[in-house]
Image (tube, coloured by chain):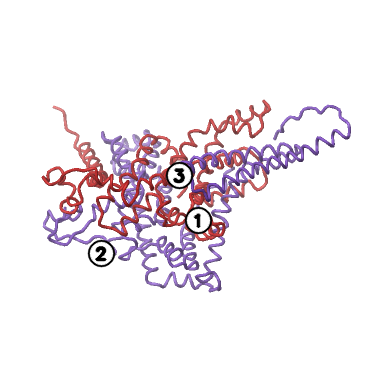
Amino acid sequence: MYQAVAEPPPPRGVGQVLATSVGRVLVSIFVPVVAFIVLWAGFLFLKDSGAPKAVIVLVAIVWGIGGVAMLYVVANWLTEKLPPAWYGRILPFVFVGPAIAILAFYLLVPAVLTGWGSLFDANGQEFVGLDNYVYSFSNPEMVTAIRNNVLWLVFGTLFSTGLGLAIAVLVERSRLDRLAKTLIFLPMAISFVGASVIWRFVYSFQPEGQPQVGLLNAILGSFGIAPVSWLTSEPLNTILLIVILIWGQTGFAMVIIGAALKGVPDEMLEAGRIDGAGEWQIFRKLIVPTIWPTIVTVATTIAILTLKIYDIVIAMTGGNFNTQVIATLMWKQAFTFFDAGRGSALAVILLVAVTPVIWYNLRQFRGRAI
Amino acid sequence: MRRINWSRVAINLTVFALIVIWTVPTLGLFITSFREKEAIFNSGWWTAFTDPQGAFTLDNYEQVLFGGDGLANAFLNTLAVTIPAVVIPILIAAFAAYGFAWLQFPGRRLLFITMVALLVVPLQIALIPVLKAYLAIDLNGTFLAVWLAHAGFGLALATYLLYNYISQLPKDIIESAALDGASHFTTFRRLILPLSMPALAAFAIFQFLWVWNDLLVASTFLGTDKEVQVMTQALVSMTGSRGQDWQLLTAGAFISMILPVVVFLSLQRYFVKGLLAGSVKG
């Protein structure tokens, strides 16, 4: 720990000392007040302004960067006015304080409030105990949503990760590697809403006899098979929505696993070959165990994504034809039916579903110095 | 005579097939967006080049941008939401990352672990209480509401990513800066921020794609007002209310993809680095 080096003060009279310290105190109050007023004015402008969008965005950027920077500059300046011992104690909180406050406001406190709210009725007036949870696990629509989410979790995670691994291994041995990597990774940049529009033209269905403009039905038709109404047949429709996720996430798995594959030592593989192992055995007994931690990380990341899945369902079916998932029902309960109790209970169910991952992440830190 | 390596041929063919499977759906959208409405419903997009009635047109783009859907407006809104929502959390996270990496204070470990725990918390858990708070101060439906929400939801990952980077910077440079009399604040501003540019860029791309492509946060905190809605919302309302205007939907979807795809392709290197550093997160 070190402090700002103070210049040795010139000898002064008592009155002078008093005047300067009063001045100091005044300045110390004045500067933060001005800073606060400027920030608050920006906040009000951004909140209520009818100014042209471009102006608002510009102000937002200046406010966002400048305001945040000013907050830290002023806080730091104030801390430097403190006696050295206090400076060392307070300064770390100048650095981490704002982030902690924001995380508390946007995640920590809301999580507690949502948990509490899930024990109350639609308006949050009457305590209903676990009724909302009983409802969540007994109402047929809810049960379908939970079943669908399990399908998403299992198939989405398994296929995205598995395909990602397979393609990463294949692509490394191919001459088309750069092109393949870019094109398979590219859907990562496309929103799930955009991806859903893309896949409409794969799943589109017209009654038999009419021209099929959907790729899948056109292919069936060329074999003389009658068209299938893909998105209305349950539970096939949920599987087909999952395909969209797989299309989007396989590239992610491929890139991360591909990076891990580069770290597998060649000597180890050579040794395996000399011992007479086939390529399949080398893959299964040497490569997979070496990169297993990476595979687990990728699978976990995708698993969390599948639990929270929302956009694809909304954009493809709007949750009709029994394609609801927990996140879409949560939104519907909370913001269409204004049933805060049931909405909160569904949010809590989502949180509980990811707790194993939270626990695992925390365990990683148990032995580690931070 | 050279022997043909059949397994190599098989691998190349498989990879080629995968490329085709992955690209064809997007190609279909691209071609459809230039076809007339009649043509879209009467024949598959793959016949566009062989079908004599299949004329190509730019009308779909013009209509969707400046017609009733006003996607041009939604495009501006998306920019207005995205840029500040990327910028605001970066600085806050960088300060926090430096604090966790290089400053000692009581409760440091507990606070850091709390942050790690928050990494994968589904943001659904926060929607109702945050919306209530927003309604209480009449903030809902404004861009500010969405910026701050995105900043809040992205902050744990941002801090974690930047911490991983900043804590690995060589101790010597920070100690020698201290010996030269630089305060922590000066060290942070003059040394740490410039040195952390790769990590800052990685997070910026990550957050950009996330915010640009988001539907849930925008639907919750912006509401259904057409004046402020973002492109994902506009597209969803086009699929719902008037599911038959496919020619507009395709053009609209394509417009919404251009910017993220360009950003993604040009900055892929940084993005991959960011993914590798932050893959603990969900």
- Res A187 quadrant in image: top left
At a point 40% along the width and 61% down the height, the residue shown is: A328
Q: Tell me the crowding category of disc 2: few under 14, some 14 to 19, or many 20 or more residues within 10 angstroms, Cα based.
A: few
- Please indicate whether residue B202 sits to the left or right of residue B41 in the image: right
Q: Are marks 1 and 2 on the same chain?
A: no
Give the number of the mark in front: 1 or 2. 1
Q: CA distance from mark 3 to mark 2?
A: 44 Å
Q: CA distance from mark 1 to mark 2?
A: 38 Å
Q: Residue at x 54, y 53 (%)?
A: A106
Please state the horizontal and vertical placement of residue A182, each as a whole percent of the image.
Answer: 32, 38
Instruction: Please name whichever residue, B138 or A141, is drawn nearer the observer in this view of the structure.
Output: B138
Write down the residue under mark 2: A233
Chain identifier of the red chain: B
**Which residue position is annotated with label 1?**
B140
Q: Residue furthest right?
A: A14
Instruction: Tell me if mark 3 has few (under 14), some (14-19) or many (20+) residues whose alpha carbon lies within 10 angstroms of its own.
Output: some
Q: Position of residue A84 (x, y in %)?
A: 75, 37
Which is in the foreground here, disc 3 or disc 2?
Answer: 3
The amino acid pointed to by label 2 is Ser
Please provide percent x and percent y for residue A296.
42, 49
On what subunit does the disc labeled 3 rest? A
Disc 1 and disc 2 in contact, CB within 8 angstroms:
no
Query: Which residue is denoted by mark 3 in the rendering?
Result: A53
